[in-house]
Image: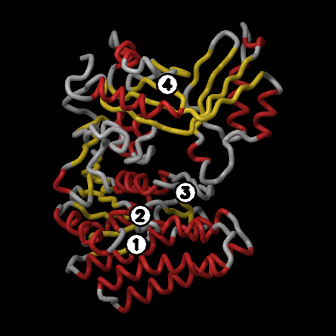
Amino acid sequence: MNQVCVAKFGGTSVANYAAMCNCVKIVTSNLDTKLVVLSASAGITNLLVELASGTLDEASIEERMGKICNIEFSILDDLGRPAEITAEIEKLIHEIRDLAKHAIIEHDDALTDRIVSYGEIMSTKIFTEVLKSKGYNAKWFDVRAVMRTNNQFGKATPIIEVLSNTAKELLTPLLDDYIVVTQGFIGSNAIGQTTTLGRGGSDYSAALLGEAIGNCKAIEIWTDVPGIYTTDPRLVKEAHVIPEITFSEAAEMATFGAKVLHPATIFPAVRRNIPVFVGSSKAPESGGTWVRSQTSTKPTFRAVALRRDQILLTLKSPNMIGACGFLANIFSILAKYGISVDLITTSEVSVAITLDHTGSQSSGKSVLSDRLLAELKSICSVRVTENLALIALIGNGMSQVSGTGAAVFSSIMNVNIRMICYGASSHNLCFLVDQDQAEQAIAELHHHLLEGNPQVIR
């Protein structure tokens, strides 16, 4: 098999028939593109999550089902309503309705994943038909046949070894003869139950599949923005697309708030040294960003990222002085409750750590449960500070170059800094600020460090 490209398209890229036709042009303009990974059409996943909640009455279910039908059947109308694919989508719609009604009676995470997966199933079936209607040899493939995961419904972990073996057996042979269309975001456990990789997991799926097929030339992430920006362009109008960026920098950006890439996407690409391209399906001629192991430039400051809704947890105890095991006790308690720590600083008698609260907003549950706080309070005093934002400067060699800190903090002299983490990685400098000062800080940092002739230390 020749080297192939994997192309992943997000929800807005397959939102309607015209958008799907743009994707067809992108796919077929590159003869190496043999594997296409899709998200659900824009808006579908949110509707499916509501249907899976078990909280809707039958009238509300029908309202959501009507919206789903409007999205899916409008695409089929533009396609000419081919009998076979129309019947398939009607069958899937009927199954969604039945499962949503069942969720009222008996709701669990496994059922939620099963219902939510229908978005990707429908978008890939329809897109395969769009390709065929334009004369291309396309084949629909159920990714659940190869994407084996654990049983953590809602945020399943892929089992890489099984994926590698099954992909080479079932998927790779098809790439010689077909443009294969498959789903992002979903997988299955050992007994065949549908699982999902978490929101944004389609990027991760594409990278995992690119790694697994064994001969991947590039992974293309097509979205609604023309690449990775120096910062969020909604916050700073002077933000611009970065032509190229290293794997390490991109991983830092994704981890610390940049939405254009799923944080886990980079790691499968790094393992196989597969370049990743990020571009706009609406304007592919605009270029985009290449993510590679090496780049031609390595500026001290490449970008600035923002992550809102952070918690600062300050733990203090005189028992820390000269004692062994205090931090180990703290982290064992956090691990017990599934809490992941982002940043940490320590003094003689206290430790401050940051926790990401953004993933808890949709569920309505706090990342810090009463039981967790009670257990921590049994060994130390606890202070919780909320409504903070994490800002990360991303670049190269930061901790090895004199003047980096001065350049950063002189740019934001009027912003109150709550915590600093610097030196653990040469690719980032992170700090916390009050949430209401975050946008001001981002604008000032971008202006002084990333625009025109910035204070970039070479």
Q: Which of labels 3 and 1 is toward the front?
A: 1
| Percent x, y of residue 162 | 49, 56
Lower position in the chain sequence, tag 1 or tag 4: 1
Report the amino acid beneath label 3.
Thr
The secondary element bearing badge 2 is classed as: loop
Label 2 to label 3, Cα distance in Å?
Answer: 18 Å
Lower position in the chain sequence, tag 2 or tag 1: 2
Residue at numbered disc 2: 39
244 on left or right of 72:
left
Q: How is the image coloured?
A: secondary structure
Lower position in the chain sequence, tag 3 or tag 1: 1
Residue shown at 26% from the left, 52% from the top? 279
Report the amino acid beneath label 1.
Ser
Label 3 to label 1, Cα distance in Å?
Answer: 22 Å
Label placed on residue 149: 3
Task: Count residues near mark 3 (Cα–Cα under 10 Å), then give few for <14, some for 14-19, many for 20+.
Answer: many
The secondary element bearing badge 1 is classed as: helix
Residue at numbered disc 4: 431
Q: Is residue 91 visible?
A: yes
Label 2 to label 4, Cα distance in Å?
Answer: 34 Å
82 on left or right of 324:
left
Q: Which of labels 2 and 4 is toward the front?
A: 4
Report the amino acid beneath label 4.
Phe
